[in-house]
Amino acid sequence: MEEIRKASKSLYNFLKLKEEIEISDLIIGLGSIDKNVPLICSNIYLNNENNTIIFTGNKGKGTENINETEAEIFKEIATSKGVLNDKIFLEKQALNTYENLYFSKQMIYQEKLKNEKITIVTKPYVERRVKRIADIFFKDKKICVTSSNLTYEEYVKNNNEEEVINELVSEIFHLLNAYKYGLMSKEKIPSDIKNSYEFLIRNGYNRYIYDNTKIELLINRCKKIGMI
């Protein structure tokens, strides 16, 4: 387990960008099971109440059986922390990270929200992929991506480590492949990160690796909604 944890930690540290939060016009909180996301969005908002929040997300891993959407749950948390109702917009269609950004962009223009500077809040190990997706959907904007400031050890202490490792592997898989379909810009993956990724796959952490059928379903969905 020590070698697996070492490889997982290397992926986690690579995927987390550690960007400094800047004052922005708009905050986008990406839906997930991680309730740190709306807390961070709330803190950013409360430090600069001129901005607006979009919470985006229908249901996904870990939230499938919850009655409310991820966006609605995040709004409840944010308003309990003092964010004004009329400063929150909900995007409730998105089924994955690509759709989070795609549908948020549509909402920005529908609601005429100020968006020259955007802060996107997500899970720690999704930061790098979000940045590359933003290169496609928000290429003319100033984007900051952030998350909870937790180490790998701190994060897995309160989350299922096996699940986290499978998701870390999935993140690298997407970075290696999604740019081919125009869903993100290309990311250079260092050789040591590739080695850790391949090591974890050999040890069975491949739960969220897409086979050809899943890739086809994703691409067909993207085409159907007009993303690509």
Image: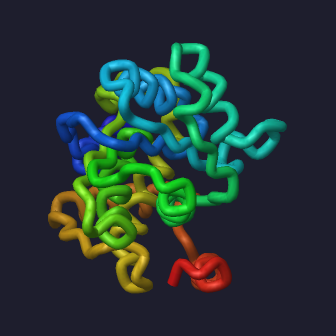
Tell me residue 49's x, y (percent).
Answer: 38, 25
At a point 68% along the width and 51% down the height, the residue shown is: 92
Q: Is residue 127 visible?
A: yes
Image position of 127 (left or right of 55): left
Please tell me whether residue 103 is drawn above or below residue 226 in the rendered image: above
| Most foreground residue, 135 or 199 | 135
Tell me residue 18's x, y (percent).
Answer: 21, 39
Please tell me whether residue 209 is drawn above or below residue 59 in the rendered image: below
Residue 177 quadrant:
bottom left
Residue 62 quadrant:
top right
| Most foreground residue, 144 or 115 | 115
At a point 73% along the width and 42% down the height, the residue shown is: 69
Please tell me whether residue 107 is drawn above or below residue 46 in the rendered image: below
Image position of 132 (left or right of 205): left
Residue, far front:
112
Residue, far top:
81
Image position of 107 (left or right of 185): right
Tell me residue 103's x, y (percent).
Answer: 56, 62
Locate the N terminus and report the quarter of the image it occupies. Answer: top left
At a point 55% along the width and 54% down the height, the residue shown is: 111
Image position of 15 (left or right of 126): left
Tell me residue 221's x, y (percent).
Answer: 65, 78
Please tell me whether residue 7 is drawn above or below residue 178 in the rendered image: above
Q: Is residue 208 visible?
A: no
At a point 28% along the width and 56% down the height, the residue shown is: 196
Count up the numbered dots: 0
Q: Which colour style is shown? A: rainbow
